[in-house]
Image (cartoon, helix red, strand yellow):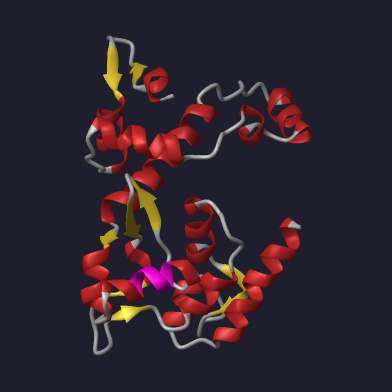
Amino acid sequence: MAADIETRDTGGGTQPLEQLLSEKFGIKMARLDIERALDALPTIHKASVALPAAEAAMYDAADFGEDQDAYRRKMLDNVAAYTRLLSTARTSAEVSALLEVDPSRIRQRVADRTLWALKDQGKWLFPALQFEPDGPRPGLVRGLDKILSALPAGLHPLAVEGLLTTPQDQLRDDEGKPASILHWLRSGGDIATASGVVEQQRWASA
């Protein structure tokens, strides 16, 4: 899979995928790490990045050409997002020290889905965004264990990240603007309200 997209025609030759990721997203990863990320990504169908028919017709009428690079950009965005999750993730030992629990307890919480973990080359990695590394109470973001355990099993990591970081209309900050689940919880928002957002997401996908 990775071999099919490892280079891009730039007009003056080809450019390695790892160089593209470094220049566009500031991510420096070895080719093997990028290939592992690609293997973990869901299949992206070209139809999923195409414009709706009515919108496409509007652009055609205005003499705007079709964006031939939409599929490639979508793929690169997904690769970048996933490699970022991997490259910034914490190890089991680091999480054990952060939460001040035995490694066996970390494994139990992974099984209970109260910690978000990614399996990579037989080892668990824990996306950093779920933790509060600083402050008076470092550890897992308050209430996030209840959110994680309510997510459907097997949900793709990019879907989990999107749900946690995308502003939600049901969650409003002090200025009345939509807030993400992570921002809501970190700001002291009601955990049950955030859990309700997850339940609505599950209804929508049923």
| Farthest residue, direction front | 104
Going 64% across and 72% down the picture, which residue do you hit? Answer: 197
Q: Is residue 39 above or below residue 194?
A: above
Residue 54 x/y as whole percent = 78, 34
| Numbered disc total | 0
Going 49% across and 72% down the picture, which residue do you hit? Answer: 112
Q: Is residue 125 magenta?
A: no
User: Would you say residue 179 is visible in this rendering?
Assistant: no
Viewer-nearest residue: 96 or 181? 96
Residue 92 x/y as whole percent = 27, 64
Q: Is residue 107 magenta?
A: yes
Q: Quadrant of the N terminus?
A: top left
Residue 19 x/y as whole percent = 25, 29
Relative horizontal placement of residue 40, taking residue 91 as reference (left or right)? right
Q: Is residue 189 above or below residue 6?
A: below
Report which quarter residue 172 is drawn in.
bottom right
Q: Quadrant of the C terminus?
A: bottom right
Viewer-nearest residue: 150 or 138? 150
Relative horizontal placement of residue 15, taking residue 118 as reference (left or right)? left
Report which quarter residue 48 is drawn in.
top right
Going 50% across and 85% down the picture, which residue do you hit? Answer: 174
Region rendered in magenta: 106-110
Going 74% across and 24% down the picture, which residue do you hit? Answer: 61
User: Would you say residue 21 is visible in this rendering?
Assistant: yes
Secondary structure mainly formed by the magenta segment:
helix
| Farthest residue, direction right | 54
Residue 82 x/y as whole percent = 39, 46
